[in-house]
């Protein structure tokens, strides 16, 4: 019996996942009206579906979300990053097992490595200064904050970490960074040319932004709504770069392989490889 996997393509990373899975790859663009019937047929045949990472990208594609929920009738397993409660509830009610890439510590750490490299690229793209010897702030010290701070330090930056948690500040200091509470943010912002935010809450407030130099830049990689008071930044003439989904923009084949490896590892556990041909259906949405 043939096996069918549907991959919903929203960026280059998703597009390359199929190359690392065993099977014959076919692709259709759902945005083309004459292709939609075939796309729906593929979805109805799917035993596995790979949703975007993060899955919240489907929030802007409500028609596609509706079609998925109505037509995943043969699906046994769903994959995605940062799967929200609404999708978890749907999968549970439909009897579909699900696997969140970002709840896998190994994948999350590998994703953080790639994100840190991409952040460095964004800093060089949008900033006016070399990373070496530059005073920089990293807000937050989770996986992405830690990997970003460590990489920038290795490139010669003088990094200060802003973190609420005492344990995070201690960890940052053990890694060789200056680390302070957000209450000291305005003081640290003085003379800083680059701030990288990883916190998905408004932590870069007007008091901090007002102390930044006019040619400074904020790279905000936190998920929506981000962590920057953008209105305050505009008032003070500070450039803010929303930099979401960086692994889908940089090193896309490396990023795709990380996710594809996880899919391959889960496949035999859930329903076996079996006989027949494997089809990989990529649907651009």
Image (cartoon, rainbow, N blue to C red):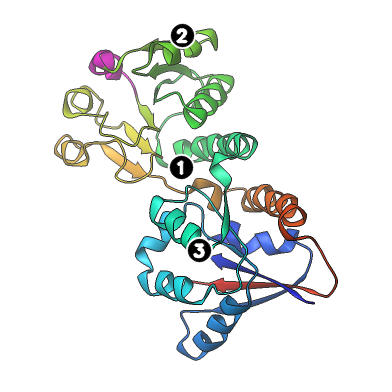
Outermost residue, right direction? 275
Residue 154 at least partly seen: yes
Residue 35: x and y in percent read 53, 87
Residue 181: x and y in percent read 31, 13
Q: Nearer the viewer, residue 278 or 168?
A: 278
Q: Nearer the viewer, residue 113 or 159?
A: 113
Q: Which mark is residue 10?
A: 3
Q: Callout 2: helix, strand or loop?
A: helix
Magenta segment range?
A: 183-192
Residue 207 sits in quarter: top left
Q: Residue at x 44, y 20 (%)?
A: 134
Check disc 3: other Cα within 10 Å, few if <14, some if 14-19, many if 20+: some
- Indicate yes or no whether the magenta region holds residue 75: no
Q: Callout 3: helix, strand or loop?
A: loop
* Dots 1, 2 in contact, CB < 8 A: no
8 w.r.t. 146: above or below: below
Q: Nearer the viewer, mark 3 or mark 1?
A: 3
Mark positioned earlier in the residue sequence (3 or 2): 3
Q: Main secondary structure of the magenta part?
A: helix
Residue 258: x and y in percent read 67, 47
Residue annotated with mark 2: 170
Residue annotated with mark 1: 125
């Amino acid at each position: 019996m043939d096996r069918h996997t549907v991959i919903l393509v929203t960026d280059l990373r998703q597009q390359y996942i199929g190359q690392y899975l065993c099977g014959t790859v076919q692709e259709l663009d759902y945005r083309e009206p004459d292709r939609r019937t075939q796309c729906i047929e593929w979805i109805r045949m799917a035993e596995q579906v790979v949703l975007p990472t993060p899955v919240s990208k489907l929030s802007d594609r409500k028609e596609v979300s509706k079609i998925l929920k109505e037509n995943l009738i043969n699906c046994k397993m769903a994959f995605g990053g940062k799967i929200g409660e609404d999708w978890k509830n749907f999968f549970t009610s439909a009897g579909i097992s699900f696997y969140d890439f970002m709840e896998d510590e190994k994948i999350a750490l590998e994703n953080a490595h790639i994100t840190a490299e991409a952040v460095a690229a964004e800093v060089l793209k949008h900033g006016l200064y070399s990373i070496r010897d530059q005073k920089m702030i990293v807000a937050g010290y989770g996986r992405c904050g830690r990997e970003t701070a460590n990489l920038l330090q290795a490139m010669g930056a003088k990094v200060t970490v802003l973190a609420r948690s005492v344990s995070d500040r201690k960890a940052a200091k053990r890694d060789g960074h200056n680390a302070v509470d957000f209450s000291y943010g305005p003081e640290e912002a003085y003379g800083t040319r680059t701030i990288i935010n990883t916190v998905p809450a408004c932590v870069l407030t007007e008091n901090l932004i007002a102390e930044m130099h006019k040619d400074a830049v904020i790279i905000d990689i936190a998920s929506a709504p981000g962590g920057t008071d953008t209105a305050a930044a505009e008032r003070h003439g500070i450039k803010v770069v929303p930099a979401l989904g960086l692994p889908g923009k940089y090193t896309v084949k490396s990023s795709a392989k990380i996710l594809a490896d996880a899919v391959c590892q889960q496949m035999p556990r859930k329903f076996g490889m079996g006989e027949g041909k494997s089809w990989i259906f990529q649907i651009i949405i």
